[in-house]
Amino acid sequence: MYTLAFMRASERAYRTLREDIVEWRLLPGTVLAEVEQSERLGLSRTPLREALGRLSAEGLTQTARGRGVVVTDISLEDVDELFELREILECRAAALAAQRGEASVFAALHAELRDAPLLLGAADPTRHAYYALVGRLDEAIDAAIANSYLAQAMRSLRVHLVRVRRLAADDDGRLTAAAAEHAAIAEAIVAGNPRLAEAATTVHLHRSLSHIKATHTPH
Amino acid sequence: MYTLAFMRASERAYRTLREDIVEWRLLPGTVLAEVEQSERLGLSRTPLREALGRLSAEGLTQTARGRGVVVTDISLEDVDELFELREILECRAAALAAQRGEASVFAALHAELRDAPLLLGAADPTRHAYYALVGRLDEAIDAAIANSYLAQAMRSLRVHLVRVRRLAADDDGRLTAAAAEHAAIAEAIVAGNPRLAEAATTVHLHRSLSHIKATHTPH
DNA sequence: ATAAAAGCGAGTGTATACATAGTCGGGATT
DNA sequence: AATCCCGACTATGTATACACTCGCTTTTAT
């Protein structure tokens, strides 16, 4: 995590609120009143408003006129829509990475992903090392596709996906399987096979969605 | 256009600046200093900062720390990247619209698009009626796909595309051809044929990109 | 008793004043 | 002559005060 001490107040407010929303500490429907939140975070209304503006632009909150901004809800229909867009973007991104990416980068990631079950054995209930590895695969794909607009579209999606992830039970079995699916994607990129990379991504996303729907528990 | 008189100052600043950038009245590299722009638009720095934040989030400006925010440049590589993402999103959107859309809505749009050359004959140098019609086709597709995240991704792209459009020469010949291509997309959606809708969109986007590259004049 | 209107209160929208950081120019030193 | 350092200025970042809108409650009239 970043040190929140030496950054601008608006940035601090943005990251704190975003994490609170993504981690479901601030539940959907919660009203984020400006005075209340600015006092809670120990800063003034001006930087807080900037943070709320960014959150609303991302879709994590929406402004309810007259009552301030409220935390956006995520329904099962939203999850379907999110994964529909995710499949559109990430399948093509994987194919482009297979065409344009540096094989050596993905070869290294592939090796790490094959060893991922070792990370899951470690005594880290938040699976920090595992998610950091998957995040590095995402970043490598972002860099490989050489398309800042596509990369930006995927980045804005990931915020919502992290939020959805918390709806599902991240048991060791699913994470081990997911690591193998990620390894398959990396392998296809190393091989420079766009169609295989796309297919591997499709498989992974469908399994992820199925798992989320199977283990979903209303909060 | 909307009446800019009775809206919030921040909204006024946002729309004015966005239009100035998209219409190339504010050229890439222009520094938007806060005091200078707030005085020009007749409002204070607070709502102006909010507007600049939204513009930077959309990618129309970027913050150069210490020197304020500057209008983002668009290179030919950017156009390639924009159209790559555009093809990913709009092809799938057209296919989804063919599956999920109301045929009657697109039948009406198809009829209008076949008559579009009449609009181009009118003495409107800005082609306002024509672009409004194409905009209604975009909105109809947005509504038909029933996926707010995909629709949002396409909307954020369109801002940049309007800006790119101003780089090319919008002669009557190209617009007539473009109208026919749009009509073909609408026709495929009416027929409920996803693959045809996708193909028609691919053809349209490739012809648009070729035309932009052929007539591009550095400013 | 119900509906409509007016008044009150809470909270957002805007302006302005102040703090702070970063850059540019000038001067001195090597 | 070139580079480094210092200082001042300019522009951003933040805080606070004020105004206005909108929602809610209360009261009054039909």
Image: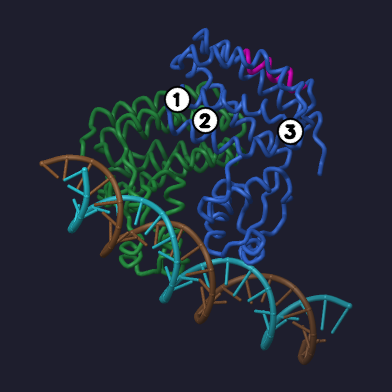
Chain colours: A green, B blue, C brown, D cyan
Q: What residue type is labelled 1?
A: Ala
Q: Residue at x 36, y 28 (%)?
A: A80
Mark 3, residue position: B126
The residue range painted magenta reads B174-184
The quarter of the picture where the C terminus of chain B appears is: top right
Is D22 drawn above or below residue A106 in the view shown?
A: below
Residue A44, percent across and down?
Answer: 40, 68
In terms of image quadrants, where is residue B179? top right
Residue B42, percent across and down?
Answer: 62, 61
Label 2 CA crowd tier, 10 Å (few <14, some 14–19, many 20+): many
Residue A186, percent across and down?
Answer: 48, 33
Q: What residue type is labelled 2?
A: Ala
- Residues marked 2 and 3 touching at CB (< 8 Å): no
The tag on residue A94 is: 2
Question: Label 1's element?
Answer: helix
- Report in which chain the residue with disc 1 lies: A
Label 1 CA crowd tier, 10 Å (few <14, some 14–19, many 20+): many
Could one spot residue A64 in this view of the protein? Answer: yes
